[in-house]
Image (cartoon, rainbow, N blue to C red):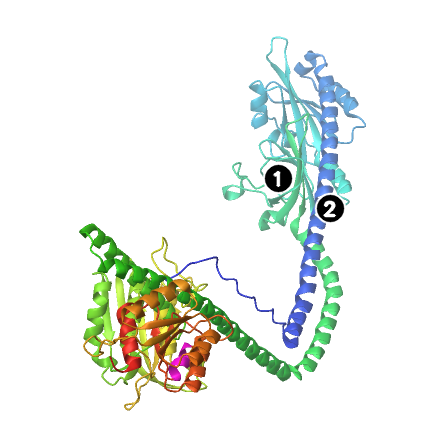
């Protein structure tokens, strides 16, 4: 629903003081903290320990990789020096056919490799791949040729030098009879014309590399060291399980990274050259595919890569042991904190009921303070509204008097149009003051006996012109509804205000539903609490729409005067204030509910305004006595009054209003005595017994108001008629209850004449 005001900045409500948590709740939090804090600290320490273990392991494998890299470079460099010496041999030795010559060459070869531990043998083959000489045994001693070797084929095709893996027949042929686990560095020997003269190969013992790797890893079974060529074939390594296995030779950098363990083999156990598995294979890892923390180095002087890895399972076991020690330290602390907290909780439970009672008393006090603040705010607004009504009514009265004078004079048609516009503006101002009086809960209501169940057609005829064609009106007014005592005019105005708000809240159409029901409100019920303590029999009238709803932050302000969400001056902000004032003046209440406020994130929306109107007794008397209707009595029911020179006492402090009223009274044939204060009026009454009527404003300066003056005059001059005039006053309701005749401001000459005729009784 579109609400009718937005004057000023949003209201700032006093924040409720934070409610201290109960002892039990605090202890529950403490015991939760006693468990969670050590666990969090344990987890943090565990994570830090894990990072420390991984960092140390990474540093270790990086150092080992650097050492193995340096060692491999030295080995390769020394092997190349040997091959250089072989190249310098007399080429005719490569054509030796006699065993004696082969033995001499073998002795020369043995001299070259003497004292070099990593070299197992130095070999020579002829151009056809037949063995010629070796450094450690006879070339013809059962050694096959290497014609079927892939390495021989590449060297024969023109490749100058290559590393031969242990799986190649050339490397296998170059091993000794006692140890076939070798890999070789082979070099092509050429004639001066470039043709193939033979092949020389240095066989390097894998046992030598195994021994070095064992020493550099300190014989750690979880650490693996591999020497891999660019094709991923393993040349040498510690904990080697599969000869000829292939792994991913990619080296991302110098720092250790996690890589999946295990060698990759092709179908039927053959190595798979396309696999990207990056970790050293061993008897366990090859089948389990475990992860390893791996560091690698590219050897600068050979197409080889050093890979050093440590098994993740080993690091996990080390971490778990450290976590166990941390847990042994944390668990006793956790247990002590929990035990202490449990003892405190036992003690706190004994005080729980007292704490609940204290909170309930505090809640009741806060509720009472909130109600008092709201009442004080409305009272302050009531006072401000009263001043606005009084001053505005005086202005309207002056303007109306001038307009009436101009109307009685001859005028042209354009002048008549201007006068009609002035009178319409005055009428609009009078309606505005009327709405303000309704909000102040002191209007002059003319209570009629109303049977709401018989008003369905009347309500439909009243509201349909105010609604658009895309809004469907529904009414549910059962015939069993109790009768009401309500001002019919004000009630119709309230229905129109609610319908207009609902229409503006449904720009795309919707449903407006009016429903009524009889309710009995018990003093202790939630309904009584919501309605400010109402009890007894009421008719509950609900007006529901399917519009956009009211935001929760302004729901409690919708009945405030001048509060509107409509822009560009499209609302006075008094529509729902009039509804609220009617309900309170009738002895009921008005409430506003919104689906938007109940469920802010929901797609459902809509607003419901609920009026509680008290049930009327069949013999109820008309509301109020001695009140002159604001619109005056019908012209055929009240005779005009003739002054015939009688004396009237006019008490009015506003000189402009006093002059207007004086002219009205004198036009009726009366003579006027004027006073501006209650004391001055009482002095005139004492001196002038010929005064026939006292007309007094309620709001007067000088310490006493018009009501107090009227009570004093009634006591001192019992037979003197009194007519009170007021735009608004704090004691209007009391004046009505005491039987004083009251006429509202602004008033015209007709209303004043009729009110004076009622008071004087005769023309």
SS at mark 2?
A: helix
Q: Is residue 127 magenta?
A: no
**Chain part drawn in magenta:** 732-738
617 displayed left or right of 215: left
Q: Residue at x 51, y 43 (%)?
A: 268
Disc 2 or 1, which lies upstream in sequence? 2
For mark 1, does the 10 Å Cα neighbourhood hold few (<14), some (14 to 19), or many (20 or more) residues?
some
369 displayed left or right of 29: left
Find the residue positioned furthest to the top.
193
**Residue 243, label in figure:** 1
Find residue 468 and report its horizontal and vertical position in percent. Answer: 23, 61
Secondary structure of the magenta portion, mostly? Answer: helix
The residue to which callout 2 is attached is 56
**From where the camera sits, is residue 205 visible?**
yes
For mark 2, does the 10 Å Cα neighbourhood hold few (<14), some (14 to 19), or many (20 or more) residues?
few
Looking at the picture, tell me which residue is in the foreground, 454 or 755. 755
Q: Is residue 737 magenta?
A: yes
347 displayed left or right of 1: right
Q: Residue at x 62, y 42 (%)?
A: 279
Find residue 211 and report its horizontal and vertical position in percent. Answer: 76, 39
């Amino acid at each position: 629903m579109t609400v009718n005001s937005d004057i000023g900045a949003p209201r700032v409500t006093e924040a409720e003081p934070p409610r201290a948590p109960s002892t039990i709740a605090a202890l529950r939090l403490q015991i939760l903290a006693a468990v969670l804090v050590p666990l969090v600290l344990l987890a943090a320490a565990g994570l830090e320990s894990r990072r420390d273990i991984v960092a140390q392991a990474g540093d270790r494998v990086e150092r080992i990789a650097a050492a193995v890299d340096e060692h491999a470079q030295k080995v390769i460099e020394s092997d190349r020096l040997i091959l250089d010496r072989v190249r310098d041999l007399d080429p005719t030795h490569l054509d030796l056919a006699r065993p004696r010559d082969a033995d001499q060459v073998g002795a020369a070869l043995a001299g070259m490799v003497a004292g070099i531990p990593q070299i197992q043998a130095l070999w020579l083959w002829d151009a056809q791949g037949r063995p010629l000489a070796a450094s450690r045994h006879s070339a013809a001693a059962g050694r096959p040729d290497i014609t079927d070797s892939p390495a021989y084929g590449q060297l024969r095709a023109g490749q100058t030098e290559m590393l031969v893996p242990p799986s190649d027949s050339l490397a296998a042929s170059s091993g000794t009879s006692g140890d076939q686990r070798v890999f070789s560095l082979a070099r092509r020997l050429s004639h001066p014309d470039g043709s193939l003269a033979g092949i020389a190969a240095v066989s390097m013992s894998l046992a030598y590399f195994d021994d070095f790797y064992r020493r550099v890893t300190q014989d750690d079974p979880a650490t693996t060291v591999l020497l891999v060529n660019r094709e991923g074939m393993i040349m040498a390594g510690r904990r080697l399980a599969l000869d000829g296995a292939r792994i991913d030779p990619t080296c991302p950098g110098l720092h250790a990274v996690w890589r999946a363990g295990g060698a990759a083999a092709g179908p039927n156990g053959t190595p798979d050259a396309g696999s990207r598995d990056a970790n050293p294979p061993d008897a366990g890892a090859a089948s389990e595919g475990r992860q390893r923390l791996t560091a690698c180095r590219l050897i600068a002087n050979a197409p080889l890569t050093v890979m050093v890895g440590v098994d993740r399972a080993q690091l996990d076991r080390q971490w778990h042991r450290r976590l166990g020690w941390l847990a042994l330290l944390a668990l006793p602390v956790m247990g002590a904190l929990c035990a202490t907290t449990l003892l405190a909780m036992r003690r706190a439970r004994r005080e729980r009921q007292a704490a609940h009672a204290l909170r309930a008393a505090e809640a009741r006090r806060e509720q009472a303070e909130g109600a008092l603040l709201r009442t004080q705010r409305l009272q302050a607004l009531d006072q401000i509204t009263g001043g606005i009504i009084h001053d505005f009514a005086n202005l309207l009265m002056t303007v109306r008097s001038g307009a009436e004078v101009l109307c009685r004079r001859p005028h042209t048609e354009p002048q008549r149009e201007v006068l009609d516009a002035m009178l319409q503006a005055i009428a609009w101002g009078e309606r505005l003051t009327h709405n303000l009086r309704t909000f102040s809960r002191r209007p002059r209501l003319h209570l009629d006996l109303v049977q709401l169940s018989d008003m369905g057609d009347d309500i439909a005829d009243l509201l349909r012109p105010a609604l658009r064609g895309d809004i469907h009106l529904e009414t549910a007014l059962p015939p069993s509804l109790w009768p009401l005592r309500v001002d019919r005019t004000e009630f119709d105005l309230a229905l129109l205000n609610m319908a207009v708000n609902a229409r503006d809240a449904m720009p795309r159409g919707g449903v407006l539903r009016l429903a009524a029901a009889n309710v009995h409100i018990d003093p202790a019920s939630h309904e009584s609490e919501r309605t400010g303590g109402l009890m007894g029999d009421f008719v509950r009238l609900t007006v529901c729409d399917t519009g956009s709803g009211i935001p929760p932050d302004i729901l409690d302000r919708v009945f405030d005067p001048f509060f509107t969400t409509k822009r560009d001056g499209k609302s006075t902000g008094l529509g729902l204030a009039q509804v609220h004032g009617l309900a309170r003046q009738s002895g009921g209440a008005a409430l506003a509910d919104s689906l938007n406020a109940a469920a802010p994130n929901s797609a459902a929306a809509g607003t419901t305004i609920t009026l509680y109107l008290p049930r009327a007794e069949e013999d109820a008397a008309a509301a109020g006595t001695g009140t002159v209707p604001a619109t005056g009595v019908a012209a055929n029911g009240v005779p005009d009054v003739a002054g015939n020179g009688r004396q009237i006492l006019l008490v009015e402090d506003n000189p402009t209003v006093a002059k207007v009223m004086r002219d009205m009274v004198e036009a009726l044939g009366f003579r006027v005595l004027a006073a501006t204060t209650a004391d001055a009026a009482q002095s005139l009454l004492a001196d002038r017994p010929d005064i026939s009527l006292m007309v007094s404003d309620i709001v007067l300066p000088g310490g006493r108001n018009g009501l107090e003056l009227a009570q004093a005059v009634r006591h001192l001059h019992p037979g003197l008629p009194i007519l009170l005039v007021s735009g608004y006053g704090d004691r209007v309701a009391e004046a009505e209850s005491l039987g004083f005749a009251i006429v509202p401001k602004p008033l015209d000459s007709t209303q004043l004449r009729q009110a004076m005729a009622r008071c004087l009784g005769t023309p």
